[in-house]
């Protein structure tokens, strides 16, 4: 197999782009090296995966040069030349997106003082921009560009009064959207890592928006951002603002760009995670619905077609388990197990079926499936797959408790504690949460072996008051069972 930068680029090409790149290479304006054209002719046979037993530099060299002696530097130079041309092609593709071509042409006409043609191009660009429904970052960037380009044409500056107000308004909106997008990243970062940011300027801007909201009502993206950010800073009305943002997002979803959809989904996830962390568990279902919706509309962080990110897969599965949504979980696994990377698929299938059997209370089968999982198949390093390990260790512990395999349960608890102590990736609050659960189950087993009514009362109080207790409902039920068992025996 060939590992090359140009191969990484070619993998991203659509079928149409493969044809366009072929034409690009054959154009003498871009390329005069016929050997590079021939190289691509060979390579595109392996599109889109570029994975085949014959996909080697030696075989490609033989295809191109027949029985000539293989020369590594020769084929390496050809790949390098193709890479340079592929990058130029990507630049051309980018220029033709988001009105970049029109804007660059207007700038070039201006630099050559071809004002009549420049004026026509500005009018055409403005006409196209007026059809845009998504008032997003690119929209206001282009509007500001148009106003600046117009000002180059006006010698009499008094004439600029015709559009200065609108120019200022577009500039303000562009600034606000840019700033709010940046603060989105900071809010998400605070949730992911132990860090605190200064949001004083954002609060000032939100206060300004609140008193001038009518000036921005024709900009749906900006208003969605506004309500979504308020949900993080207005504690008394945060849920009202969150659902208002969600309602507007649903209404305008189709006209928003993919990157804006991703940003909004990311913020909604962060809001839900914060709520769940504060013990408001109805947001587990809201979060699950958001993740499934992202999959439905293909608004996900990865770029590969028909491949699901393994951590996204896990998040949906764990939410289904938390909510005891067996039907949704089964459908999700059926729909997406074949979208898991082939190297991880067998282990993910065992991981998935272990959780289904766990929900169905088939505890022996759960343990059997847990032992089939090869964690090295999941993610690259031990630390990276620790979330999967934590999941499995927890359901193994509960299963062993349900089967009265207490010695094995004690062993799992001890091993899990050592695992947590050695992990460098888990945040301290996550470690504490899992450690609390392990100690709690440990105390429950001891109580089941040697009943003490006072200790049972204390454990139940402890479980009831702890908002973040893992498997809280299961634990409360098991504590009731311990009491019932004792009453039957007496």
Image (spheres, rainbow, N blue to C red):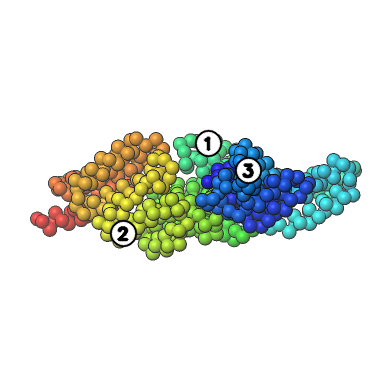
Residues at marks 1 and 2 touching, judged by CB atoms closer than 8 Å: no
Q: Nearer the viewer, residue 129 or 71?
A: 71
**Spatial CA span between label 1 and label 2:** 43 Å
Above or below residue 111? Residue 44 is below
Question: Residue sitting at 61 percent across and 60 percent down?
Answer: 254
Mark 3 lies on a secondary structure that is: loop
Q: Is residue 461 visible?
A: no
Q: Which residue is mark 1?
A: 197
Q: Nearer the viewer, mark 1 or mark 3?
A: 3
In this picture, residue 430 sits left or right of residue 43: left
Disc 1 or 2, which lies upstream in sequence? 1
Rate crowding at label 2 as few (under 14), some (14 to 19) or many (20 or more) other CA atoms within 10 Å. some
Q: Which residue is mark 2?
A: 357
Disc 1 or 3, which lies upstream in sequence? 3
Disc 2 or 3, which lies upstream in sequence? 3
Mark 2 lies on a secondary structure that is: helix
Q: Which mark is residue 68?
A: 3
Question: Residue sitting at 83 percent across and 49 percent down?
Answer: 162
């Amino acid at each position: 197999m060939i590992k090359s930068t140009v191969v990484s680029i070619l993998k991203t090409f659509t079928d149409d782009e493969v044809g366009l790149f072929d034409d690009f290479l054959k154009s003498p304006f871009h390329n005069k090296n016929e050997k590079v054209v021939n190289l691509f002719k060979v390579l595109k046979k392996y599109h889109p995966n570029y994975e085949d037993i014959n996909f080697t530099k030696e075989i490609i060299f033989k295809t191109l040069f027949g029985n000539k002696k293989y020369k590594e530097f020769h084929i390496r130079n050809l790949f390098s030349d193709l890479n340079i041309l592929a990058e130029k092609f990507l630049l051309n593709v980018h220029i033709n997106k988001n009105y970049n071509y029109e804007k660059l042409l207007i700038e070039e006409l201006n630099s050559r003082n071809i004002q009549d043609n420049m004026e026509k191009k500005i009018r055409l660009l403005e006409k196209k921009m007026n059809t845009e429904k998504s008032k997003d970052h690119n929209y206001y960037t282009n509007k500001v560009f148009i106003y600046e380009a117009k000002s180059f044409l006006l010698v009499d500056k008094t004439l600029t009064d015709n559009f200065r107000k609108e120019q200022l308004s577009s500039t303000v909106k562009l600034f606000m959207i840019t700033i709010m997008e940046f603060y989105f990243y900071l809010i998400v970062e605070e949730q992911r890592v132990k860090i605190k940011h200064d949001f004083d300027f954002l609060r000032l801007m939100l206060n300004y928006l609140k008193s001038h909201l009518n000036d921005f009502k024709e900009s749906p993206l900006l208003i969605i951002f506004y309500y979504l950010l308020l949900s993080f800073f207005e504690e008394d009305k945060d849920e009202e603002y969150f659902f208002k943002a969600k309602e507007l997002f649903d209404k305008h979803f189709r006209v928003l760009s993919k990157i804006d959809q991703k940003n909004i989904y990311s913020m909604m996830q962060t809001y839900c995670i914060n709520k769940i962390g504060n013990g408001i568990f109805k947001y587990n279902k809201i979060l699950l619905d958001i993740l499934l919706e992202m999959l439905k509309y293909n608004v996900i962080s990865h770029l590969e077609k028909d491949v699901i990110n393994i951590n996204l897969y896990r998040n949906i599965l764990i939410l289904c388990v938390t909510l005891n949504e067996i039907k949704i979980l089964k459908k999700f696994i059926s729909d997406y197990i074949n979208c898991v990377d082939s190297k991880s698929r067998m282990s993910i299938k065992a991981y998935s079926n272990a959780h289904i059997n766990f929900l169905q209370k088939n505890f022996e089968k759960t343990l059997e499936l847990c032992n089939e999982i090869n964690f090295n198949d999941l993610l690259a390093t031990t630390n990276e797959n620790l979330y999967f390990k934590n999941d499995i260790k927890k359901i193994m512990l509960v299963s062993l408790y349900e089967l009265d395999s207490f010695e094995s349960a004690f062993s799992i608890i001890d091993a899990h504690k050592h695992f947590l102590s050695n992990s460098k990736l888990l945040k301290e609050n996550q470690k504490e949460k899992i450690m609390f659960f392990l100690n709690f189950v440990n105390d429950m087993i001891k109580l089941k072996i040697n009943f003490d009514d006072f200790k049972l009362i204390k454990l139940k109080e402890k479980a009831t008051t702890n908002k973040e207790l893992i498997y809280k409902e299961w634990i409360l039920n098991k504590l009731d069972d311990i009491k019932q068992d004792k009453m039957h025996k007496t």
